[in-house]
Amino acid sequence: MNKKRLCALTALTLAAAMTLGGCGGKEETPEVSAPQTAASEEAAARELSLTDSTLGVTAWSSPNGATVDLTAVPSEHAKDDSAEFVVRLNGKDMMRIPCQWEDNAYTASADLNAEDGYSYSVALSGKDGAYAEIPVSASETLTDLADSLESYCSLTLDETELSEGDLTILNGYAIVQAPRITANNENVACAQATLVLALDGEEIGSVALTMAPGETERSYDASITDMSFTIPDTIGEGQELTLRLDAVLTDGQNLTAQGGSWTVENGSIANAVG
């Protein structure tokens, strides 16, 4: 074989080798996992929730506040999970109380002043970054503590008539509200309600009212129509008649409210106020 032919054969062999190398299987570069981002960590966090929650309340010995007790059962609980009892007043944070974990539930208590507009929630936190704040359902009794702690009575005289020595209530109504939150969770009710006519503060007549359950919890009311009181013939110039409602609750509280007053001027009873 001559030298020129040998060189050509060698070049052909090298070209074939290069062609085969280009068409052969390419060595794959191993994939490298991207670092976990904050978003993926958040997506991986558990979804925290509650399966049950209850609120209890007890009035203080004085009617200017109450203690609200929380029990909340989470859907799951892991080591180092925690919770806070969040109390807001008219949408503003009032307090965040760390909960205790006992008997498979979170518990906490909050001492709250007698005000209206409270709302409650539970903030759940996990060591893995999971977080959720869950509202706790509360009745009007628990949202409006000031109103729920209060007891009162009222007497409204829509129409009255003075004639022939009688004072007649043509149309009116009486309301008695017992406290809805009490110190010992006692169910306080209206035991007695009486309309009292007084002359210069001294009782001269009375009528017992029959009170029926009202529209709100532990309230009582009665409609008053065509109810008459006799006015003494001896009533004199400048003296004052008053009509009031006196009520007694089952816990011993005495309530009173004035409904109207009349004075004697120039020999006539006038100047009704009610």
Image (cartoon, rainbow, N blue to C red):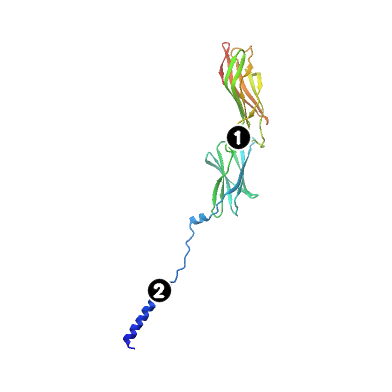
Q: Looking at the figure, which quarter contains the C terminus?
A: top right
| Residue kind at label 1, given as amino acid type | Ser
Q: Give the x, y percent position of residue 45.
A: 53, 54
Q: Is residue 5 left or right of residue 138?
A: left
Which residue is labeled 1 in the image?
148
Please tell me how many numbered marks the rendered image carries: 2
* Of the image marks 2 and 1, the number of the one nearer the N terminus: 2
Give the answer, above or below, for where 37 lies relative to 67: below
For the point 60% across and 45% down, the residue is 53
Q: Give the x, y percent position of residue 85.
A: 58, 45
Q: Looking at the figure, which quarter contains the N terminus?
A: bottom left
For the point 54% across and 49% down, the residue is 132
Distance, label 2 to label 1, CA atoms, is 87 Å
Q: Nearer the viewer, residue 32 or 87?
A: 32
| Residue kind at label 2, given as amino acid type | Cys
Q: Secondary structure at mark 2?
A: helix
For the point 66% across and 20% down, the residue is 206
Q: Give the x, y percent position of residue 191.
A: 67, 28
